[in-house]
Structures are given as structure tokens and as C-alpha cells.
Amino acid sequence: MLEENELVKVVSDELDLRKGENITVIDVKGRTSVTDFMIIVTAMSERHAKSLCGYVTDKLKEFGVRPLGLEGSDQGSDWVLLDLDNIIVHVMTAKARELYQLEKLWSIASRSQETGMTP
């Protein structure tokens, strides 16, 4: 079984190999009870987003890792979420990534936690 950091690297490397763009890893340990890491990646199209999740899932099978869930892989979805328990992979089209700005959201949450303020 892979260590958490090794799993993050395997997923990130597979996304990069499959032409995922602007791969960002956010460590959210202690900031949410849902997961420890979020990986955000831009896909070139909705089809590419779905394919990236498929490639990651296939790669993880080599290590005996199976996703807990997959959301948004239906036709016409510009945001696909792959739940790997301690890692959540957000695969988004450029338009969706710009709209939702997850990096900015978690940056605000981090600053608020440091100051003791709520976002």
C-alpha cells in the first residue's frame, strides 16, 4: 500500500502524463474532516476530464487502490470529482476552474484559520 505522499505523486504524475494542465496540490490536513489533500487539474474538455479520472483509476489499480467514488462523470459535466479517501481529485475544464476558484477558496480558509476568523 502506498503512503499518502506517494499516492499524491502517483496521481499527479499520471495527470501530467495524460496532459492535465496546471496541477495543484493543496494540503488541507486539519482544515477539513473530509480529506487530507486536494488535487486540482484543468482538463482540455469535458471528455478529457472524464478520461483523466479513468486513467488515474486504472493507474491506482496497479497499487491496489480503488476510488471510493466518482461524481460528475456524466455527459456534459465540466467538473469531475474522484474520491480517493485521503485525496480528492478535482478535474475541471478551464471555465469551471475559473468560475469556482477552489485554490482561492482554500487560501481564504487558510488565512482565516490562522487569524481565528471565519471566512
Image (cartoon, rainbow, N blue to C red):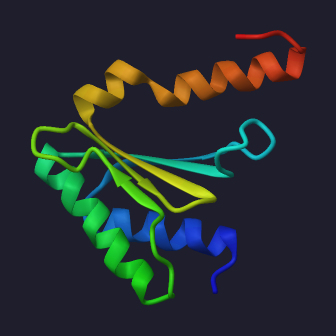
Q: How many marks?
A: 0
Location of residue 59 by image quarter: bottom left
Where 90 sits versus 1, above or below?
above
- Residue 25 pos. (x, y %): 56, 49
Residue that appears at 41% across and 84% down: 61
Taking 115 as reference, is 22 left or right?
left
Residue that appears at 11% across and 38% down: 76
Residue that appears at 35% across and 63% down: 16
Taking 85 as reference, is 27 left or right?
right
Location of residue 9 by image quarter: bottom right
Where 22 sits versus 61, above or below?
above
Q: Quadrant of the N terminus?
A: bottom right
Location of residue 108 by image quarter: top right
- Residue 105 pos. (x, y %): 57, 22
Residue that appears at 57% across and 57% down: 87
Q: Quadrant of the C terminus?
A: top right
- Residue 66 pos. (x, y %): 46, 75
